[in-house]
Image (cartoon, grey):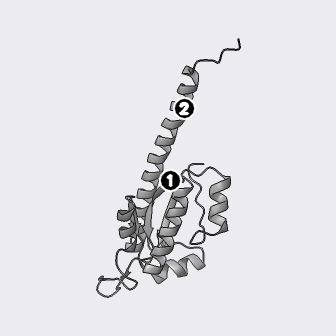
């Protein structure tokens, strides 16, 4: 398995805390919406995971904007750039913005993602961009983890054995 992605409830409740304390986690992807209230919850979650030494892969903004079907203009209904501000504040990658689109919801409800129903739509493009960026960050994290494991292994091999005299 290359990736196991678990969609957790927002915040710092029992579920994310328990997972972080009981299983090895390569990294956390923070998904937030542009509103200040949601950004504040995301910031608290980042703080919790940093205290637990769980790396943050990056930030994605969901419901980032609405694309008018008549003029293709972006409308920032819930505010503009909340996730980008978080990524800058914590010096972590901003990995994508997913637009608000009723087709995403209706397709999800019937098991037909927008990637299948409207593969050429701006929403499908946004998912592809975010997925590519997330996969790239996961690969970087995996390479760093591999290097650390190899380094620890070579350090153990080169450590002098304790004398039993």
136 relative to 18, above or below = above
- Dot 1 alpha-carbon crowd within 10 angstroms: few under 14, some 14 to 19, many 20 or more: some
Rendering coords of residue 71 (x, y %): 28, 86
Q: Residue at x 45, y 57 (%)?
A: 134
Q: Nearer the viewer, residue 132 or 78?
A: 78
Question: Which residue corresponds to the image point at 44% horizontal and 52% vertical from the top-left?
Answer: 137
Residue 33 is at least partly visible in this image: yes
Q: Which of the numbered marks, if any, corresponds to residue 152? A: 2
Cα distance between the residues tagged 1 and 2: 19 Å
Q: Tell me the residue at 35%/85% (across/down).
A: 69
Q: Secondary structure at mark 2?
A: helix
Lower position in the chain sequence, tag 1 or tag 2: 1
Location of mark 1 (residue): 55
Q: Which mark is residue 87?
A: none
Height in image: 138 above or below 160?
below
- In the rendered view of the protein, which quadrant contains the C terminus? top right
Q: Determine contact: label 1, label 2, CB under 8 Å.
A: no
Residue 48 drawn above or below residue 64: above
- Where's residue 157, x and y in %? 57, 22
x and y percent of residue 78 in the render? 40, 84
Question: Looking at the image, can residue 116 be seen?
Answer: no
**Is residue 11 toward the left or the right of residue 94 in the image?**
right
Of the pair 100 and 88, the residue shown nearer to us: 88
């Amino acid at each position: 398995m290359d990736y196991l992605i678990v969609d957790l409830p927002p915040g710092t409740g029992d579920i994310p805390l328990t997972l972080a304390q009981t299983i090895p986690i390569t990294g956390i992807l923070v998904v937030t919406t542009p509103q200040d209230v949601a950004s504040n919850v995301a910031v608290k979650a980042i703080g919790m995971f940093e205290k637990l030494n769980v790396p943050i892969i990056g930030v994605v903004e969901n419901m980032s904007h609405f694309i008018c079907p008549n003029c293709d203009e972006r409308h920032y209904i819930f505010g503009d750039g909340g996730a980008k501000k978080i990524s800058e504040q914590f010096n972590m990658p901003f990995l994508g913005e997913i637009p608000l689109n009723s087709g995403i919801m209706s397709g999800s409800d019937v098991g037909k993602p927008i990637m299948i129903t409207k593969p050429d739509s701006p929403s499908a493009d946004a998912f592809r961009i975010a997925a590519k960026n997330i996969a790239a960050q996961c690969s970087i994290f995996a390479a760093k983890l591999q290097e650390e494991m190899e380094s620890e292994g070579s350090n153990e091999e080169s450590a002098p054995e304790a004398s039993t005299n």
